[in-house]
Image: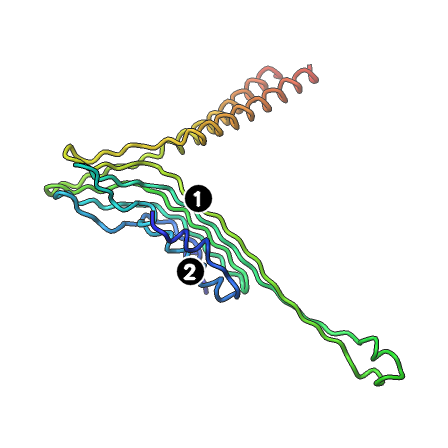
């Protein structure tokens, strides 16, 4: 995986134009070079990792201004109501997130090309507990409804 | 008039082929990219995952798929819950009738 996602994540955006430029740069994450690592030579084998990469980013800028008669202008002793107070302000914000997860390791050796999958046990266990929790909630509600109904 | 394809890209992208001991490998990835510019605001999302490797040796081209076992396990578990819920709901309806 190359450095493009890291470069994007550490870039500061100060103007809408810079935000749009960064949005354009986000398309570089769509290149295959981001997913496949550079080949690493180890003995007779060349190893490449293949990773899933996801990246999201958003920004927004806003501003406004207004005017109002000042307190001085409202008093008849001063300037007869000609003075006004004006103000303007603006701001912006943004944020992003990126994720990369190894999917497989590709080993190229004398016996050909082998693709070894990488299992993310944490994600599988989390999915198992989420599924189990969902099933438990669903069945407990069904059981309660059938008891109330019957 | 802007087209939907200006904002959303869903495609299989072919990477730069590389050669090792007479074997040429071409990586393939699947990309979902969304770009939404709204005046002074904007948002973007890119999802890129490996799909397969095209291995060319002695004139033969072989497609070696890259299987995401973690994703299959996640989707399988969630689908299992959905199916169990549907079956349980159907059984309960049958009992009520």
Q: Looking at the image, is B36 positioned above or below residue A38?
A: below
Question: Residue B48: image x %, image y %?
Answer: 38, 46
* Location of residue A142 by image quarter: top right
Residue A59 is situated, as x and y percent measured from the top left of the image, at 53, 58
The label shown at residue A24 is: 2
- Residue position for label 1: A99
Coloring scheme of the render?
rainbow
CA–CA distance between discs 1 and 2?
19 Å
Q: Residue at (51%, 21%) from the top-left corner?
A: B87
> Which of disc 2 and disc 1 is earlier in sequence?
2
| Pointer 2 chain | A
Nearest the eye: A36 or B83? A36
Left or right: B5 with respect to A32? right
Numbered disc 2: secondary structure: helix
The residue sitting at the left extreme is: B58
Q: Nearer the viewer, residue B2 or B51?
A: B51
Q: Chain of mark 1?
A: A
A123 over A91 or under it: above or below: above
Q: How far from the left and from the top, in percent, is residue A21?
A: 44, 63
Q: Residue at x 35, y 41 (%)?
A: A51
State which quarter of the image contains the C terminus of chain B.
top right
Q: Are marks 1 and 2 in contact (CB under 8 Å)?
A: no
Residue located at (80% from left, 76% from top): A69
Note whether A53 is above or below A17 in the view shown: above
- Which-is-in-front pick, marks 1 and 2? 1
Quarter of the image where one finds residue B56? top left
């Amino acid at each position: 995986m190359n450095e493009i996602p890291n470069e994007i994540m550490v870039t500061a955006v100060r103007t809408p134009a810079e935000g749009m430029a960064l949005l354009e740069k986000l398309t570089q994450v769509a290149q295959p070079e981001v997913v496949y690592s550079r080949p690493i030579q180890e003995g007779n084998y060349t190893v490449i990792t293949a990773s899933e990469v996801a990246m999201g980013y958003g920004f927004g800028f806003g501003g406004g201004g207004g005017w109002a008669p000042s307190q001085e202008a409202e008093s008849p002793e001063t300037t007869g109501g000609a003075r006004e107070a004006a103000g303007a302000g603006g701001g912006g914000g943004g944020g992003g997130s990126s994720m990369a997860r190894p999917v497989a390791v590709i080993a190229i050796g004398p016996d050909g090309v082998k693709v070894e999958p990488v299992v993310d046990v944490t994600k599988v266990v989390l999915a198992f507990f989420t599924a189990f929790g969902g099933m438990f909630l669903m069945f407990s509600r069904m059981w309660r409804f059938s008891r109330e109904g019957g | 008039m802007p087209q939907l394809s200006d904002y959303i890209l869903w495609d299989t992208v072919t990477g730069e082929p590389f050669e090792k001991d007479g074997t040429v490998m071409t990586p393939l990835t699947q990309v979902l990219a969304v770009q939404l510019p709204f005046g002074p605001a904007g948002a973007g999302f890119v999802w890129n995952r490996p799909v397969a490797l095209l291995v060319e040796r002695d004139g033969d081209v072989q497609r070696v798929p890259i299987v995401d076992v973690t994703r299959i396990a996640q989707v399988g578990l969630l689908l299992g819950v959905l199916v169990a819920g549907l079956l349980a709901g159907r059984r309960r309806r049958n009992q009520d009738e």
